[in-house]
Image: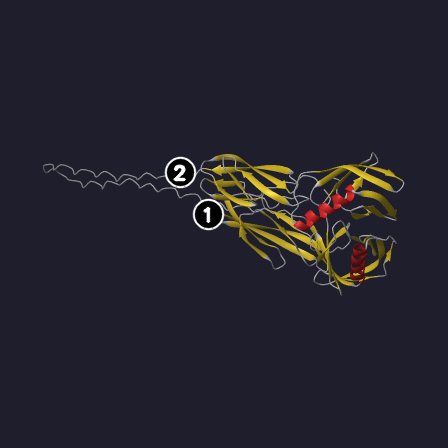
Amino acid sequence: FTLFNPNGTLIGYTGCKDLSANFKTSYNQISITDISLGPGTCPDPTSQEQEGAMVAILRAARSYYVADTALQIAGDAGFLNYSLSPLNRPETITPPQAAIQMVPQAQVGQVVVFDGSASTGQVPLVSWRWDFGDGATASGVVVQHTYTSAGTFNVQLTVTDQRGQTSSSTASIHILALPTPTFTPTVPPPTATPPQPTQPPQQPTYTPLPTAEPPTATPEPPPAPVPPVANISGPGQGFIGEPVKFDASASQPGSSAITAYSWSLGNGVDLPTSAQSSISATYNRAGNYEVTVFVNDANGLSSYATTRINIDARLDTSVWTLSAINTKPLLPGTAITMQFKEGELAGFAGCNTYYGSYTADQNDDGTYTITVGPLTTSRLACPQDIMEQEQEYLISLQQATRATVQENRVILDSLPGKLDFYLIEPP
């Protein structure tokens, strides 16, 4: 995206790096100078090629044209075509958010799992660095560590995204000392009563009563182990194809530390036992589901807790951005968008804007059967390859028959092939 400010500056994002520059306009003429790119790297050659083409066109820009909600910048290096409808992208990409998942308590010598997979970023994360608070460090999304001494330690996770931005999160873990064995003292045997000395015959003689032995002390039995107390939290509402998070980190240990969690999602899916106290799940059918977590401790004791979630379906979203037409990536420097809203379909086809109508009926498997009505477009002319790409897209869209929503993707099945869109979430 590129944002042209009234003061003659522009900011944007190439898909890999932040972009800034100055510009001047006179009638339909434009010049762009002082282009500067921020830190970061492109994840693949295609993204690198697209960034290079975009920067080259901006540097050589000579003229611009506005028609309806479309903007075209032309120059010696080619054309850039923008949709002026607001895309679901921030003006600047926010830093990532580090998130730690771990047990709050463990024992000396016990292997503890630390999970950073819940960390998020608007661009891909490339590094997870751990500091366990006892002088040891590690790197990776999920790591393990064993503490050799008791105490409370502050664990820090630092994540870095593709643009070099970082974020840190800290959590405390309490490490218990190993229990000290206790010994029950042995009660000594009673002392035998010495025999009475023989007395000369006397009259009369009485037989003495037997001496009673002192009772033997019975040791107290050890207290029965106490099981953990499971606790689960999660949203009461979710949508088909969108992840929902359930958290059992508020579960309380009993006589020993909690060591594992297992989950039943209520839709026939049971997750394997692990040390993760929270999970993300995705449902592909609407309905009401009971989610259960089973909490296990080092003594082999367990407990469980349940919650319910209602899953609905939705198709209306913000702006979807096309990533491929029939598995083919878009031409460098081009973008195609689409938006469903209350029976109306609109977007930017790479050169021209378009709009039309659609119907959508939900199927039992969570997909939608769709019908796209006639499409109307603006009348800009673009280079031949861009016009051919636009035409291929509009034909495929016109013949789309099914939509599948998968988290931040929507796939349209059409007679010519597939249209694969993605959604960039707002900050």
Q: Is residue 139 left or right of residue 120?
A: left
Please name the amino acid that badge 1 sits on.
Asn
Please tell me in which quadrant of the rendered image residue 131 appears.
Answer: top right
What residue is drawn where x is 85% and y is 44%? Answer: 63
Residue closer to the observer: 16 or 35: 35
Q: Is residue 408 left or right of residue 170?
A: right
| Numbered label attached to residue 299 | 1
Q: Is residue 382 left or right of residue 93?
A: right
Q: Secondary structure at mark 1?
A: loop
On the image, the x and y values in percent for residue 70 come to: 84, 48
| Numbered label attached to residue 139 | none
On the image, the x and y values in percent for residue 81 come to: 81, 49
**Farthest-out residue, bottom:** 415
On the image, the x and y values in percent for residue 294 come to: 55, 51
Task: For label 2, count other residues whose C-alpha is less than 10 Å away and answer few (under 14), some (14-19) or many (20+).
Answer: few
Q: Secondary structure at mark 2?
A: loop
**Farthest-out residue, front:** 76
Work out whether 348 lies above or below 62: below
Q: Is residue 280 visible?
A: yes
- Of the 4 image quadrants, the one containing the N terminus is top right
Work out whether 241 lies above or below 162: below
What residue is drawn where x is 75% and y is 64%? Answer: 416
Label 2, label 1: how far apart the Cα atoms are: 16 Å
Task: For label 1, count other residues whose C-alpha is less than 10 Å away and answer few (under 14), some (14-19) or many (20+).
Answer: some
On the image, the x and y values in percent for residue 150 come to: 46, 35
- In primary-sequence order, the first of circles 2 and 1 is 2
- Of the 4 image quadrants, the one containing the C terminus is top right
Please name the amino acid that badge 2 sits on.
Thr
Q: Is residue 84 visible?
A: no
Residue closer to the observer: 330 or 338: 330
Residue closer to the observer: 395 or 381: 381
| Numbered label attached to residue 180 | 2
